Image (cartoon, rainbow, N blue to C red):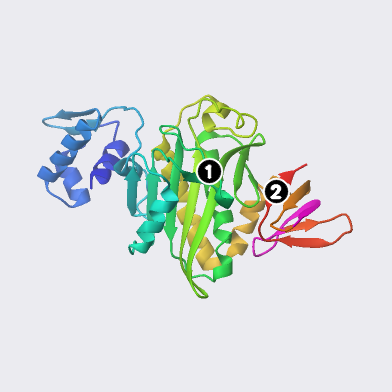
Amino acid sequence: MKGQVLKLLREHNTTFLSGEKMSQVIGCSRTAIWKHIDALRKEGYDIVASQNKGYQLRETYPMLSEHEILSYLPNDSLFTNVIFYRSINSTQMAAQKQVSDGMTHGTLVVADEQTNGKGRLGRTWHSEKDSGVWMSLIVKPDIAFEQAPQLTLLTAVSVTRAIEKLSKVNVTIKWPNDLLINGKKVCGILTEMQADTDRLLSVIIGIGLNVNHKQFSDPLTDIATSLFIETGKTYDRSQLIGGILDEFTKLYQLYLDDGFAIIKPLWEAHASSTGKKISARTATTVIEGIALGIDNEGVLLLEDEAGKVHKIYSADIDLH
């Protein structure tokens, strides 16, 4: 409910909003509204009160918290449950525990800091506090097991659209899970599945997005970037999370209704490798050739020098 109060205050920040009006909209007592206002003030929000007018939220320093994130979510958001940690080893590990404990579809696990962030293929993701978006989404789609990797591509499009709307920078997607700005990695996506024999139980989608990093130390300097480095601006991470989840909710519903065909052209519009020479390093070999794009299942198509088209289901991609 605190998130709902904050959302109302933010939506009406140019005027005063009465406690009675807020209680009617939210469906609670005026006393409950006052208690949440008091709690928000103690957290640092500058909320002024007028005896005859109500409450008004003054501009405050962007914060990252459960109710702050909820205040940026649309009413029809898929994600209604937000679990926030100041510091945790990994949001993926926390999300896995939530699934084991029976956590429902549409849960977001987010942290200000990860001490052991997980990247693809067991790699470490550097996740310092006050700097990025480190979160995991729990969804339980009614799709076949082999379709789950398509959610990585859907998520990449969702994050790309949210970044471009907020920062106005051009983002490209490197198959299957990297987002790039000016050729440097700004975001990575990790999709993990829980299944019972041939039945998909749940999917956990991890997102690591570099937002307010001022700089990176070696060896990341030449390969990583952040929104701050690219634009010179500091971003409200709660607002950015809200934008990502809004885009994801829209695309996820389209995907469930119409399949991957609706997502494919959106992904291709941001693809970094299509028409370029690449190397695909799989678990057993390295294949070089021209990236042709993705097929209707989201599989990467690569044409080698002999003209043979290979379907790449999982690989590390290097652009030449």
- Residue most toward the right? 306
Q: In which quarter of the image is the C terminus?
A: top right
Calculate the distance from the C-alpha at mark 1 to the C-alpha at mark 2: 18 Å
Residue in the picture at 28% in, 27% down = 58
In this rendering, is residue 208 above or below 61? below
Asked if residue 263 can be seen in this view, the reply is yes
Q: Quadrant location of residue 310?
A: bottom right
Front-lying residue, 97 or 276: 97
Front-lying residue, 244 or 59: 244
- Mark 1 crowd level (few <14, some 14–19, many ≥20, 10 Å Cα): few
Chain part drawn in magenta: 285-300
Q: Which amino acid does label 1 sit on?
A: Thr
In the rendering, at what x and y percent does residue 179 appear? 60, 43
Residues tagged 1 and 2 counted as in contact (Cβ below 8 A): no
Q: Earlier in the sequence, mark 1 or mark 2?
A: 1
Q: Nearer the viewer, mark 1 or mark 2?
A: 1
Residue in the picture at 69% in, 57% down = 283
In this rendering, is residue 211 above or below 110? above
Q: Residue 317 carries which label?
A: 2
In this rendering, is residue 146 above or below 64? below
Does the magenta portion include 29?
no
Element carrying mark 1: strand
Q: Residue 124 carries which label?
A: 1
- Mark 2 crowd level (few <14, some 14–19, many ≥20, 10 Å Cα): some
Residue in the picture at 59% in, 61% down = 262
Element carrying mark 2: strand
Left/right placement of residue 306 relative to residue 205 reads: right
Left/right placement of residue 35 relative to residue 148 reads: left
Q: Which amino acid does label 2 sit on?
A: Ile
Q: Quadrant location of residue 139?
A: bottom left
Q: Quadrant location of residue 295?
A: bottom right
Asked if residue 77 can be seen in this view, the reply is no
